Image (cartoon, rainbow, N blue to C red):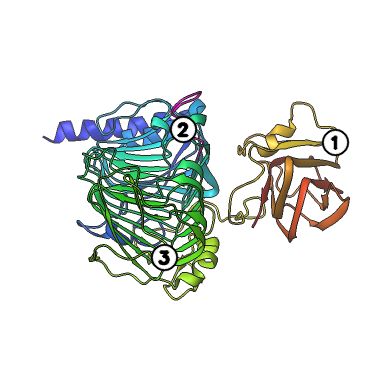
Amino acid sequence: MRQPVTRRLQAALATLALAAAAGGIVLTAPEASAAAGSATGYATQNGGTTGGAGGQTVRATTGTAIHAALCGRAAAGTPIVIEVEGTINHGNTSKVSGSSCNTADGVIELKQISNVTIVGVGGGAVFDQIGIHIRESSNIIIQNVTVKNVKKSGSPTSNGGDAIGMESGVRNVWVDHTTLEASGGESEGYDGLFDMKADTRYVTLSYSILRNSGRGGLVGSSESDVSNGFVTYHHNLYENIDSRAPLLRGGVGHMFNNHYVRINSSGINSRAGARAKVENNYFEDSKDVLGTFYTDAAGYWQADGNTLDNVTWSSPGEDNNPAGPAMESTTTVSIPYAYSADAAGCVPDVVSRTAGAGKGLKVSDGNCTVQPPTEPTPGPTDPTPGPTDPTPGPTDPTPPGGTNLSIGAGSDGSSKASGTSFGHLRDGDLTTYWSPAGSTGHASIKWDSATAVSSVVIREAAGSAGAIGAWRLRDADAGTVLASGDGAGTISFPRTTLRKITFEIVGSTGSPRIAEFETYAG
């Protein structure tokens, strides 16, 4: 039997080597663990969720490289940690074949596999119009990534319009510190942000942002799809969601310490026999945040310790049974795992400082205090990072929390060097850049409407680190100086509402090159 095993290992290494040669993947040493912290909620049940802990760590900068890493394993269950940096899109995500994977073009496909961690590192990981599809798989961790604008109609399409979708016997998934965003509802081509169906169980969504979507997510695709459940949602921000926050059909859901803002039609929709434990959440500027909606197939809930801040309720009807205004419980739900819930009153503050990608993976201690995650103790198989995993320096700053507002904005500035573009300032790609025609110049990010900004990150392109000397940051509307200093990096200033912000390079050495001009609301 030795010869076939050896051949399989050789084939796996060959697949990884081919991907590395093509770009987008870097091999690093095995590690004891990669995702920070440990799984919580229902993801701790049924044997727990550890992802690719103990397996090889691979760095990927394209979707194809992610697929190649999966296909390069010895078997479909061989543990692996895939560190992702950069923008993953249709242009760099292709099918890769192998005995340890089942991938497809135009979607990150985690199909018929197990023991995998995908974690955003460095300057961050953005899955732009590309969904993550988990099918017939188990023990999966997704952490510190942004998935945005995944469509089911229009162009391009991916994953049936779901940012993250799970189906067909999925078990034990922990999704943590992610940002899941759309830009509208079904009429604009979008579907759900976080969907589970066809016998998906033992899932936790924690410290994440779900924003600007017609549908937050569902558990069960129809009134007969009730084999799903045991899902925990905690310390998440649901913002500007029309409905399904989430929709439960059968099974058990546990929602605690979430901040719901502008739930426009309905929120937690428990139906078809589902049971929801809803505790210590903060509901704000929202409608019908809990109940059974759009069906006569009743669901049930236990509601404790929640805060209602400007919440309105519709009248009961044949297919409409809102829980409010009293929010009286209709069942009791026993939770099998240990947890500490923050008081509802501090939830908006705690969630604002912890939820979403790029927040440093901070968590709550259950007493309204924010702290860094508990890191695993390094052991003999967890070596100090080498040359392929450098310590972030001035050209690789940790971004402020929240969404990079420059993505999708406009840009302009002074004369640019030949071959460069203002669009490169806001494309999320660190390999492209803008450069002034000389040693000084200025570049701007602009929006169609007034936008609140409190911090900027200037990232220099590879090979030009340290070239930017003295600079000024201006409110281009008012002409006032927001900040000044020397060198690229993170710039913080009092929160300012404006339409255009300008970075002026006053002095430099060599040829200054800005790969990204990122802006954040803070």
Residue for badge 2: 186
How far, Cα to Cα, is label 3 from label 2? 40 Å
Label 2 environment density (alpha carbons within 10 Å; few <14, some 14–19, many ≥20) = some
Residue, x 61% and y 54% (percent of image)? 399
Q: Nearer the viewer, mark 3 or mark 2?
A: 2
* Residue nearest the viewer, comparing 472 with 250: 250
How far, Cα to Cα, is label 2 from label 1? 41 Å
For the residue labelled by badge 3, is the local secondary structure a helix, a strand or a loop? loop
| Quadrant holding the C terminus | bottom right
Q: Earlier in the sequence, mark 2 or mark 1?
A: 2
Picture coordinates of residue 351 (x, y %)? 50, 62
For the residue labelled by badge 1, is the local secondary structure a helix, a strand or a loop? loop
Q: Nearer the viewer, mark 3 or mark 1?
A: 1
* Residue nearest the viewer, comparing 380 with 149: 149
Label 3 environment density (alpha carbons within 10 Å; few <14, some 14–19, many ≥20) = few
Picture coordinates of residue 73 (x, y %)? 29, 38
- 1 is higher (above) or lower (below) than 55: above
| Amino acid on which the number 1 mark rests in the picture | Ser
Picture coordinates of residue 172 (x, y %)? 26, 51
| Quadrant holding the N terminus | top left
Disc marking residue 375? 3
Q: Residues at badges 2 and 1 in contact (C-beta under 8 Å)?
A: no
Q: Which residues are magenta?
A: 148-157
